[in-house]
Structures are given as C-alpha cells and as structure tokens.
Image (tube, rainbow, N blue to C red):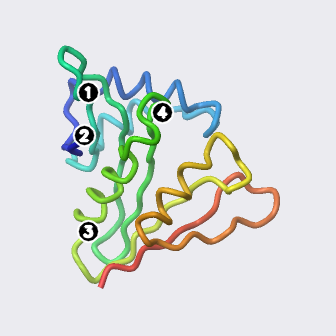
Amino acid sequence: MNAALATDADAESWLELVREVEPLFGLMPGFEEILVRKIGQRAAFCVRSDLIGDSRVLGGILIGGTPMHGWIRSLAVRSSGRGRGVGCCLLAKAIEHFPPPTTVSLDTFREENSEGRPAPATISTNGLPTWPASLGRRSASTAIHIA
C-alpha cells in the first residue's frame, strides 16, 4: 500500500469519498475548492485502490500549517478501505512530510462515536496520544511532536 501525492485525476473519486463520510463529519461546503488548491500545493495525499482497473481513492489526507506547527486538515477513509491500514499509511505519509522539530495537530472522533472509532485506534496504533474532547464535542484533539 502506498500513499502518493494526489492529482487532478483523483478529485472526482475523492469527492465521492467526501460524500460517503459527510454523515460523520457534517456538511463540508467548499471542500472541492480546498481539495483542488491542496492538490496544486502538493499538500494532498491519497491511497488508491490496488485492484486492477480500479483507481478509486480509498483514503485521503490534506495537510497544511507552518514549518513549526503543521495541521492535518482532513483525513478520511472509504468504508471499503477501513481496517486495511489505509489510515495508518496516510498518517505516516503526513508525518514524513513535516521536518523535525515540529508539532502536527489534528482533530479526530471521540471514542464514543462508533462510526469514527477506527480513527483514534489508528492514531494510538501509531504510538500517538489522543486527548478526549470536552463534553458535547464530536471530536478529540491530537498533537504529534516530531523531534
């Protein structure tokens, strides 16, 4: 499995992924414009299906920020790609992108969210801490310190 820079050819499939995860994240107005901009900035990575004749985006990640404090702006995995290491692969690619020393922040789901439960598990599997969100929030914050 390989996370690679996304290209314009990935946009349509990525937007299908966005529609699939919208019930988890909520509406994402303007996402298409953000995706196109991030692809142009070389700040969008994706894992594509490895099945012959199927190049759909299984998962994608958008990154941003500054050299001292990076952000993972969006990390989503298609339901058919969950539990196969897609999220881990994307997370590793994003961390690779930020030179040490830096801090990389992201928001993820609370463990109480059954549909989003794989996200905190992926982060923990990679040895990264998650901090519980305050009551009533849909997400939890995570900071990754790269030394």
Viewer-closest of 13 and 77: 77
Viewer-closest of 131 and 49: 49
Question: Looking at the rendering, which quadrant does residue 11 occupy?
Answer: top left
Residue that mark 2 sits on:
39
Badge nearest the viewer, 4 or 3: 3
Residue that mark 4 sits on:
30
Viewer-closest of 28 and 111: 111
The residue carrying pointer 1 sits among few (fewer than 14), some (14 to 19) or many (20 or more) residues within 10 Å by Cα, namely: many
The residue carrying pointer 4 sits among few (fewer than 14), some (14 to 19) or many (20 or more) residues within 10 Å by Cα, namely: few
Say what secondary structure mark 4 lies in: loop
Instruction: Tell me which label, 1 or 4, sits earlier in the chain.
Output: 1
Instruction: Tell me which label, 3 or 1, sits earlier in the chain.
Output: 1
Q: Is residue 49 left or right of residue 113?
A: left
Question: Looking at the rendering, which quadrant does residue 139 occupy?
Answer: bottom right
**CA distance separating discs 4 and 3:** 26 Å
Residue that mark 3 sits on:
98
Hey, what amino acid is under mark 3?
Phe
Horizontal and vertical percent position of residue 48:
26, 32
* Location of residue 52 with respect to 88 vertically, above or below: above
Instruction: Tell me which label, 2 or 3, sits earlier in the chain.
Output: 2
**Quarter of the rendering occupied by the N terminus:** top left
Residue that mark 1 sits on:
10
Badge nearest the viewer, 1 or 4: 1
Instruction: Tell me which label, 4 or 2, sits earlier in the chain.
Output: 4
